[in-house]
Each structure stands twice: as C-alpha cells, then as structure tokens.
Image (cartoon, helix red, strand yellow):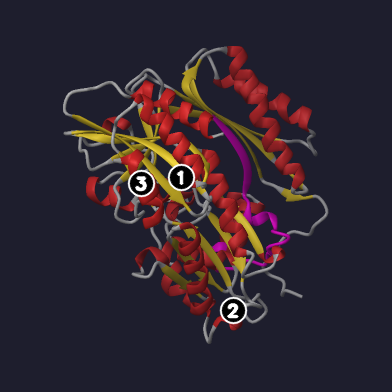
Amino acid sequence: MSTKIGQQLVSRVNQYFHRLPETRYHLSVVNVNADQQYHYFFYIRRRGVSTRSLPLAAEPAKIDLLMDSLSIFRQSYQLPIILTGFSYDEQRRLHQLTR
Amino acid sequence: MNYQHEPHGLFLVVDNKSFFASVECTVRGLDPLTTPLVVLREVPHTAHGLVVAASPMAKKMFHLHNRGTKSQLPHDDRLIIVPPRMELYEKRNQQINELFLKFVGKKELLPYSIDESILDVSHHWKKYGPSVDSIVKAIRQEIYQQLGLITTVGIGDNPLLAKLALDVVAKEQPDSVGRLQYRDIPAKLWPIHPLTNVWGIGKQTAAKLNSLGIHTLGDIAHTDPHALQAAMGKVRGTSLYATAWGIDRSHLDDPRPHRSHSISNSHVITEGSSNEHELRQTLAKVGQSAFRRVEKQGLVPGNISVSLTFQDSPEDFHGHSVSKTRNFVGVPDQQSALAIAVRLFNQLWHGEDVRIVFVGFGNLQRLTSEQLDLFAPKE
C-alpha cells in the first residue's frame, strides 16, 4: 500500500513540477481525523498568480505507512514537506524525512 | 389564516456553509471561514473553467461567486485553487447524515440535497435543554468537532418554514440560525422581493407571476387561490399559495409531492459536444434516470421538458439555453416518455455544440393520493 502511494506521489508530482521561475513548491500531508486518513497535496505558489493545491493521494492514517511513502517520495524529490494535524511525537518520528 | 389545525412541530434544515469549498479546506487543515479558496472545474487543455464553489473568505476578499468563470479569478497568490472531488463531498454528506442520526431517528431525517438535510426534532429537543437552541447548538458542535464544517440552520414549525428560515432569515443572523413560526409569516415572508429569493420559485415562475401583477409572497397570499390555480396550474398554484401561507403538511418519511414541484436530471458535457450519437445517448441516460426517480416516488408526471444549453464559444461557459415542454396524455411509461424527449430534442437541436442536457418531469401527482386541499381542515 505505502509503496504504491509513494510511487503515486512521485508520478503525480512529475506531472506538476516544472521548475518555473519564482515559484515555490511543497508537499503537504494532513492527518484528517474525519477519515482516519492522511491526505497528500501538492502546492504550487507563484507571486502574482493564484496558488494551486492539487490532491495527490490519501492513505490510512498509520505512521509507518506514511514513513514508507515519504521515503519513496524523498528518493525523487527534496521539496519541503509540511505536516498538519500530527502530534509532537509523530512529528519527531517524521523529522528525518521532512526536514 | 387559522393555523390551529396545522402541524406544530420543531423542524430544522441544516445547511453546510459553502460545502464543497469548506470540505476542501478541512482536508487541507485550513479554516473554512478564513481561507480564500475556490473549487474550479477546468476544461482540460484550455484556459477555461467554472467556479463550482467559493469559500466565504474568497467571496469576501475577491467578490467571487459560485458559477463564475476562471477568467474572473484574480491573479493573487493568497487565493487557493483546487479541483472538484464529488466523491469526497458525497462521503462527507453521508458522514453528516450519520451524525444527525445521533439526534433523531431514521424516519425523522430527510437528506434533502448534498449539503442540506431536514430533521424533525419535535420529540427530541427537550433532552438537550430548555429551548430548541440547545439541540441546534449540540448538532452544530458535533458536526464541527467531528468534521470541521460550519453549518447554518433554519428552525420552523414545519419543514417548509424551516427551509424558508434557512434561506431568508439565517443569512441575516450573526449566529447563522434563522427561526420562522406561523405568526412570523406576514412580517418576515410576505415582503420578500424578488420572488426568486423564495425556495421553489424559479425565474420562469417569477416572470409569470410578475406578469399577473404578483411581486411578493404577500401578493400570492392575497390572490384568490382559484385564480392562482387557473393561471399557474392546479398543483403549482396550490403549492405557491401554500408556500405564501407557510403551510406544509408533509411528513419526513412520506414527503408529499407539492414539496417537489418537478424531478429532473441533467448532464454537463465539460468540453461541449455536437456528436449526435453522444448527445442522444446522454439524453436517454438523463431521461431514464429522472423517470426512474419519478416512479420510485410513486408519482405520475403531467409533463416533460427537455432543455439544451449551447456553448456559443469556448470562452462562454454559461452559453444560452433552449427548452420545450409537452404535456402527457394519460399516464406515460418510460418508453413513451423518452420517445417524447427525443421528439423535443429533434426540435431543439440543429447541430450546435451542447454543454448541458436536461430532462425534467413536472406537474407531478400521486396516482392514489388525494390532492392537498388547503381549504379543508386537516384531520
């Protein structure tokens, strides 16, 4: 599951990441309690242009799965990863992958 | 009007504020009230798109509205644009209705649309406090805590008044809760203008009423109901008169037909199509689906309408519409209804690019039930 999600993240970001000038990109991972899922989004923010937030994938909220997915993503991209809705302990565990 | 014999319950219509945009905010960990976000349906490989929903802050900051076009969006990086995800919205709607079942029984809940539900709390509100406000607060808190969504609520003596309270009164209230009782009707409902602000009154009906010199609900309430029936049709005339007086005798587990003036279905072809085969297939699908819903509710349609919205140019998202309506003679089955739909389509379409195919069944009646008689006391 996590390998599949990790590959899916990479494949979707391949479509959206174009290294445009004056453009910031980041991956956002949100722990959504309502679904007990992690939701992944890709943000494209460029001055003077509206920001895009593109849904990439969602997977069951299990920290080990998330670590696997982010490890695969990190093999291809060194973009910033922003976590939302995670406890202090979870953020600490994920620190190596998200810094 | 003597309301003594009318139902006096406690009904809520709960609506999710800017539902699609709010859901998209919450799954991103963003505040639905303070985040400027629009849900944009884009036409692939073109620069065109339609705003499906805008968050309250997007509306406030950039004066955006639903059904605006992509070209109207500001070039501002504070505005977040996201694609629509109907499956997610349907899932949230289901979760919301499951939360409602903590407060009422299944027969006291009617999911009315993807972002609105009607609840009969008549037998439950006392458990939560001395007034109906307590149960309303508890329901809103539950939805907010579980799903992060902000709700607007209409409270009424019957489902119709609750819906009108939501549409007309709640918007003006700082707490987004509107209340309507029978005694409020002359002061709060009758002055509403234009008539299209009233639930169930569309542009065409309003135009017809205006041509009769009727401009407010108060005018409808003081029109001879028989004259109204003669001008607008028996079912429609009765329904309008009932709305003007705030009368609704339906039960949530058996909604009467006058609460649903027509049943329709439509299909949007995102990039437009002039392919005859595709259009005829779409027409059949849309017509079959609408007819099945008519049958499922045990209703018989009095007429059928087909409407096509043409795409005048790739930049033009709204286009212009043409429509035709035919009355049925006798009780139609699906095959004969669809045959008429095809005939109407043939009259309307001459090779144009079509963006929306619509089929509606109107003047719905129950085969076996008696008509709502406003002039007889309720038993």
The CA distance from mark 2 to mark 3 is: 40 Å
SS state under label 3: strand
Give the residues in magenta: B243-267
Of badges 2 and 3, the one in the foreground is 3
Of badges 1 and 2, the one in the foreground is 2
Q: Is residue A42 left or right of residue B118?
A: left
Residue A17 placed where, x, y %?
A: 31, 24
| Type of amino acid at the residue the image marks with label 1 | Lys
Residue A60 placed where, x, y %?
A: 54, 44
The CA distance from mark 1 to mark 2 is: 37 Å
Disc number placed over residue A83 in the picture, else none: 3
> Who is closer to the viewer here, B124 or B266?
B124
Q: To which chain does the residue with label 1 belong?
A: B
Tags 1 and 3 touching, CB below 8 Å: no
Residue A37 placed where, x, y %?
A: 51, 46
> Who is closer to the viewer here, B204 or B63?
B63
Q: Is residue A92 magenta?
A: no
| Type of amino acid at the residue the image marks with label 2 | Trp
What residue lies at 33% left-to-right and 27% top-to-bottom? A77
> Can residue B311 be seen in the rendering of this structure?
yes
SS state under label 2: helix
Q: Which residue is mark 2?
A: B125
> Can residue B114 be seen in the rendering of this structure?
no
Which quarter of the rendering shows the C terminus of chain B?
bottom right
What residue lies at 59% left-to-right and 19% top-to-bottom? B279
Label 2 CA crowd tier, 10 Å (few <14, some 14–19, many 20+): some
Q: Which residue is mark 1?
A: B203
